[in-house]
Image (tube, helix red, strand yellow):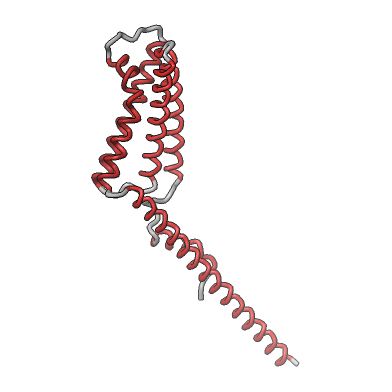
Amino acid sequence: MSNPNNLLDKANELIADSGGGGGRWSKQKTALLLIHLAILLYTATHGISASLHFAGDSNWQLFGQIVGVVITEVTILAIYVLFALGYFTDTGEQIAAGATYALCFVIVALSSVVDATINAGGTIPAGGLLAWHLAYGLPLSPVLVGIGVTAMKGFSGDVWANIREKTTQREADKMAFDARIATEKAGIKTAQQVEALKLASQLQTAENMAK
């Protein structure tokens, strides 16, 4: 007979059996997501501030730099979330994703260095790495990100098909999990009803014998 006290243990076992852990969300992943958001907010603020200082009267250059900042930041966050959910399964795909992730972090880090230098009263030498980064690196970063995403897709065969497959599998796992839990609950309820009937029968028998 099923014991209600074991229902939680059985649920944990079912989660483990259905592939729990690898691609499932957790408190640790939530903490890392919050850390990512804090870092990206910090670097985005510096990147936009550096662009405002450097672009001057060139609205197109300012637009290109800000677009570069936004796309780079979003790409970092997207790669982390996809990795945390287990969508990158192929080794080549993981390498391409890691390289793109690292490149994006270098881009936002350079923007932060530029802004920190300007805020500290320093100057950005013309023709130097930081000046080149603002003039060309940020506006071209969407192209670099696109190359990275293309590499991920090429290594994986079809990253979006992989995402759809993972999503479908998760939905199927959840339905199977819910069905098994419902079966356990039904079994427990039936067992309780049987026990109640037995107890009522025993009480009735005892009353009849006492008369």
Q: Residue at coordinates 39% horizontally, 23% vertically from top-left?
A: 64
Residue at 59% across, 80% down = 194
**The one of 188 and 171 positioned closer to us in this rendering:** 171
Q: Where is residue 3 in the image (x, y as percent from the top left)?
A: 52, 70
The spot of residue 135 in percent (x, y) is 33, 17
Residue furthest to the right in view is: 211
Compared to residue 206, the image places residue 53 above or below, namely: above
Q: Point out residue 76 in the picture as x, y percentages from the top left corner.
A: 38, 34
In the image, is 153 to the left or to the right of 68?
left
Dividing the picture into quadrants, the one containing residue 112 is top left
In which quarter of the view is residue 134 placed?
A: top left
Q: Which residue is found at the position 34% from the left and 21% from the top?
A: 110
Q: Residue placed at 42% from the left, 43% from the top?
A: 29
**Which corner quadrant holds the C terminus?**
bottom right
Q: Up-down: is 177 above or below 59?
A: below
54 and 7: which one is in front?
54
How many numbered circles are shown? Answer: 0
For this rendering, which residue is in front, 133 or 38?
133
Residue 119 is situated, as x and y percent measured from the top left of the image, at 42, 11
Q: Is 36 placed left or right of 107 in the picture?
A: right
Q: Quadrant of residue 195?
A: bottom right
